[in-house]
Image: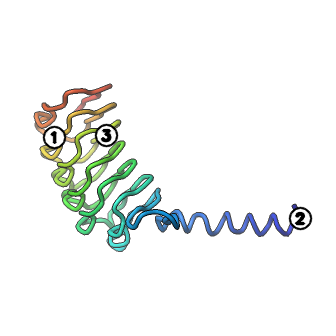
Amino acid sequence: MTTSIRRTISFHLLVLLPLLAQAGCRAADAAPGACVGPIDVRSQDDVAALASCRTVDGDVRITGSGVSDTRGLEGLTSVRYLIVVGTSLRDLSGLAGLREAGGITIAANPVLETLQGLEGIEALDGLVIAENDSLTTIAALAGLQRAGEMTVAGNARLASLAPLSSLGQAGELALGR
């Protein structure tokens, strides 16, 4: 391969692939609404862009204080992994359509009060709920029946884990204040 061809390929790999990944690029033969992750959601404009996705083959990473509302994502039904970190969200109500996720991490969201929106999740391979200073209830997880590794820690205002009483099967569990 000539040096010129290598440079051209390198350019395309360095410039185009990250742009396609960031945009949630769809495969040409994918079903409408089928998106490919990882998809980073850092603003309300990113929330609006994700609204066309029904499934995401990859991670959805909702991060940063520029995200204060998940409304518009009700049609999202499946993701490989959902990450919600450092947002301005008070709840997750816009994720009410979510039924399948391999795992969920919800951490360091200072104003998150409830996990409302996750009621449809029945099974997870991993769950982390940590350092959400205003979280008072995890009632939305009452339907969770199976979880692999679970960590619930550092949620100072969370008074009860009773909503997890329907959990029939759990792997490793780490709890803390």
| Residue at the farthest right position | 2
Give the quarter of the image for residue 16: bottom right
Depth check, front residue: 96 or 18: 96
Q: Position of residue 15 (x, y in %)?
A: 64, 69
Per the model, the C-alpha gap separating discs 3 and 1 is 16 Å
In this rendering, would 23 be left or right of 55? right
Residue annotated with mark 2: 2
Residue that badge 1 annotates: 143
- Tell me the SS state at disc 2: loop
Q: Earlier in the sequence, mark 2 or mark 3?
A: 2
- Tell me the kind of residue under disc 2: Thr
Mark 1 touches mark 2? (CB < 8 Å): no
What residue is at 26 percent from the left and 50 percent from the top? 99
Quadrant for the N terminus, please. Answer: bottom right
Amino acid carrying label 3: it is Val
Please state the horizontal and vertical placement of residue 111, each as a whole percent of the image: 21, 56
